[in-house]
Image: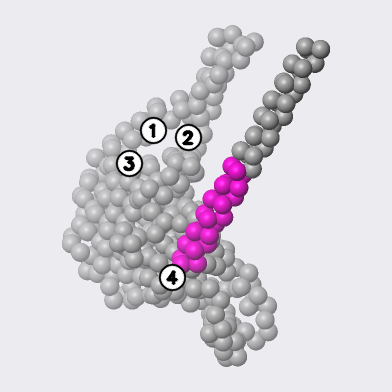
């Protein structure tokens, strides 16, 4: 089931001029907030993300493809282009959102789809971002039964809204090809040597060198194949759905290339100001950020960056000592009670320990006195 989230009119806000229409077509083709057409991307393009920055056209294309695949792995993931506006002859503003069904409500949605005569309705809960999640109430149950009586089941889906600013610069074809050629050479020279081997006990230096040379050649060929795949994926303008009058692979309107991609998420404004209070929406944000792991980082490195730059410990239920189903007051009282119990138990253990130690030493003294008496006899 494909559902349509809230959208703004694209046709009325595409802007004036070919650049905005080119961006709109490129983003629709890539099905992500990124441009995957290599011919309109500078080799030195910079990416300023919500919590991560990087530079270089190679990194940009690889990250865009990796992030797209990671996001599409989420249940019923969908990217929606909301608005494209041209701010200046070289700047374009893009508003978009990403939606998916969180794993926590997948079972609920599956249950509704098997009910006869019941329609699944996806609902947006972003308006509840500044309100804490509450537990079960009879009012919620009454509302659910009312919806079922009307023939539909409301299922809250995840929504992440973002704003992207794309900055272009006029770069001639010769300069563009030279810059990309230089980037390809640097990538080829630095990539294959990333993996090194340890020398086995039975292995000579010559055998180790041969094994290392073979692995370097293998990595070099692998990188070349990957680059070819990226180039092939970024040069397929046939799948475009709109703006047929603007050829995506050509930039005859000025040879403008993307030099900076700046991106921000609306929920991060609430995080920075500590106004985000809804735990479910906070979990949706973390799921989206998990899909944005850069290819150059491992899972643990990215997790540390997310925790550092998107600290959600202030959200009720997201702290390390928070317990599901309890409000903050109940949690604090439970922790205080637990602390009192632990303190009382510690005192009892200490008293019993002192008592047992005293009895033990008394027995030792009696045995020593008995030995002295027996030795004198």
- Residue in view at x 53 percent, y 85 percent: 139
Q: Earlier in the sequence, mark 4 or mark 1?
A: 4
Quadrant for the C terminus, please: top right
Question: Along the polypeptide, which appears first: circle 3 or circle 2?
Answer: 3
Which residue is pictured at 39% across the width and 75% down the height? 127
Q: Secondary structure at mark 4?
A: loop
Picture coordinates of residue 336, whole percent (x, y): 49, 59
Camera-side residue of 133 and 3: 133
Mark 4 surroundings within 10 Å by alpha-carbon count, few (fewer than 14), some (14 through 19), many (20 or more) = some
Q: Say whether disc 3 or disc 4 marks the residue closer to the N-terminus.
A: 3
13 sits to left or right of 342:
left
Which residue was labeled with disc 2? Answer: 223
Q: Which residue is mark 1?
A: 187
- Quarter of the rendering occupied by the N terminus: bottom right
Asked if residue 151 is positioned above or below residue 114 in the image, the reply reads below
Disc assigned to residue 65: none
| Tag 1 near tag 2, CB within 8 Å | yes
Q: What separation in Å lies between label 3 and label 4 (alpha carbons)?
A: 41 Å
x, y percent for residue 332:
47, 62
**Callout 3 crowding tier (Cα within 10 Å): few <14, some 14–19, many ≥20:** some
Picture coordinates of residue 23, whole percent (x, y): 31, 60
The answer to whether residue 209 of the structure is visible from this angle is yes
Give the labeled residue for mark 4. 132
* 2 or 4: mark nearer the eye: 4
Magenta stretch: give its range: 328-351
Please identify, in this view, whether the residue under mark 4 or under mark 1 is nearer the observer: 4
The tag on residue 56 is 3
Instruction: Residue 356: name its quadrant.
Output: top right
């Amino acid at each position: 089931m494909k559902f349509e989230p809230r959208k703004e009119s694209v046709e009325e806000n595409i802007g004036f001029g070919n650049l905005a229409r080119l961006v709109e077509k490129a983003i629709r083709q890539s099905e992500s907030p990124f441009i995957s057409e290599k011919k309109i991307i500078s080799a030195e393009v910079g990416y300023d993300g919500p919590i991560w920055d990087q530079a270089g056209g190679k990194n940009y294309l690889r990250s865009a493809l990796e992030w797209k695949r990671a996001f599409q792995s989420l249940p019923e993931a969908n990217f929606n282009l909301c608005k494209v506006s041209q701010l200046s002859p070289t700047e374009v503003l893009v508003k978009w959102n990403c939606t998916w069904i969180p794993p926590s409500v997948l079972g609920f949605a599956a249950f509704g789809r098997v009910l006869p005569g019941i329609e699944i309705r996806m609902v947006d809960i972003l308006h509840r971002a500044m309100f804490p999640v509450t537990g079960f109430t009879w009012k919620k149950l009454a509302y659910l039964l009312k919806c079922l009586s009307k023939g539909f089941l409301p299922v809250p889906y995840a929504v992440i809204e973002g704003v992207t600013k794309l900055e272009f610069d006029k770069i001639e074809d010769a300069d563009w090809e030279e810059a990309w050629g230089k980037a390809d050479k640097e990538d080829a020279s630095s990539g294959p040597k990333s993996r090194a081997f340890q020398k086995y006990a039975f292995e000579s230096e010559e055998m180790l060198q041969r094994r290392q040379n073979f692995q370097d050649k293998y990595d070099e060929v692998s990188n070349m194949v990957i680059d070819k795949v990226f180039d092939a994926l970024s040069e397929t303008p046939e799948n475009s759905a709109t703006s047929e009058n603007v050829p995506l692979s050509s930039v005859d309107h000025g040879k403008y290339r993307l030099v900076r991609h700046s991106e921000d998420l609306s929920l991060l404004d609430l995080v920075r100001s500590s106004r985000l209070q809804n735990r479910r929406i906070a979990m949706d944000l973390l799921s989206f950020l998990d899909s944005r792991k850069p290819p150059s980082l491992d899972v643990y490195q990215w997790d540390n960056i997310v925790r550092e730059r998107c600290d959600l410990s202030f959200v009720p239920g997201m702290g390390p000592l928070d317990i599901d189903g309890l409000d903050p007051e109940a949690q604090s009282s439970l922790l205080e009670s637990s602390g009192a119990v632990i303190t009382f138990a510690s005192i009892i253990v200490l008293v019993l320990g002192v008592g047992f130690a005293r009895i033990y030493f008394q027995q030792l003294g009696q045995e020593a006195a008995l030995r002295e008496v027996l030795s004198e006899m």
